[in-house]
Amino acid sequence: MINGVSSPEPTPTAGQQGDWESLLPDVIDPANPPVGAFDGFAVLLAGESELPWAMVNWFGAVRGQQLFVGLANPADPDLPQADRTMPELTHGYCPDVYNNRRTLILNDTLGYNQFATNPVIDEFGIRTYQGSPLIDERTGHVWGTICAIGQNPRPRTVGRPAKLLMEHLRDLLMKPLYERVPLASASHHSTTPRALTAPAALTRPGFHR
């Protein structure tokens, strides 16, 4: 649980499969998102996008940080492993997706002036990114994003299929959120965002070997 009652299971890798929907609770508490189920969704996202890392990124759970409540790491032991948090809201491209409320596809992160200086390029070698916002249409609140990233640039022809894929998977994840996050709870979070305290198991930042 995010609020420190228990630690999550080890994060799955992109080579593993699982029925993420079967792990969802009947009622989802936004303050304690179902990490196991979201990890399973991230595995699905990594597989469908054919990229080594995938995340469900929950904004507002830890002040000043991005919290990956769903995470799939590459099976390749030579690639760095992502941790549960990104320490800076300036790191990566999910903050742009969150703030602008639209899908972002970067086939080559160095090909766009506004994105080419992001720290994740030098620090982690990220050269491709695709992400989409999780917008609750009932309230207009953005819960966070889903994203997939890799270290190799992709051709421009991947752009439109990647956008369609991300928006399809976004809708796939939003469906149970609509069904299992009570409207009263969604409305509360849309008007009174609060900073939560994550356990140490969820707060080691960045990537590591």
Image (cartoon, grey):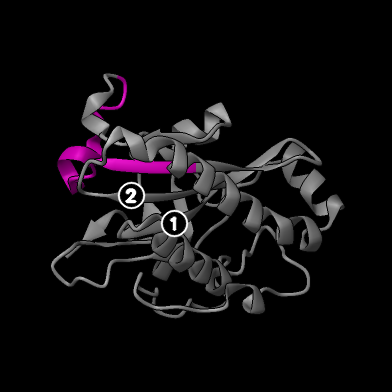
Could one spot residue 64 in this view of the protein? no
Residue 91 position, x and y percent, is 33, 38
Residue 105 position, x and y percent, is 41, 36
Residue 40 position, x and y percent, is 51, 71
Q: Residue at position x 45%, y 80% from top?
A: 9
Taking the view exactly as shown, the residue that stands out farthest to the front is 157
Query: Label 2 is placed on what type of residue?
Result: Ile
Query: Label 1 is placed on what type of residue?
Result: Met
User: Which mark is nearer the camera, 1 or 2?
Assistant: 2
Taking the view exactly as shown, the residue that stands out farthest to the top is 113
Residue 39 is a magenta residue = no
Q: Is mark 2 on a helix, strand or loop?
A: strand
Taking the view exactly as shown, the residue that stands out farthest to the right is 184
- Residue of label 2: 149
Query: Does residue 127 appear to the left or right of 96 in the view shown?
Result: left
Q: What element carries label 1?
A: strand
Whether tag 1 and tag 2 are in contact, CB under 8 A, the answer is yes
Q: Which sits in the foreground, 157 or 10?
A: 157
Q: Residue at position x 73%, y 45% from top?
A: 189
Q: Distance between the residues labelled 1 and 2?
A: 9 Å
Q: Identify the image quadrant of the C terminus.
A: bottom left
Residue 142 lies in quadrant:
top right
Q: Is residue 42 above or below residue 138?
A: below
Sequence-earlier tag: 1 or 2:
1
- Residue of label 1: 55
| Magenta residue span | 114-131
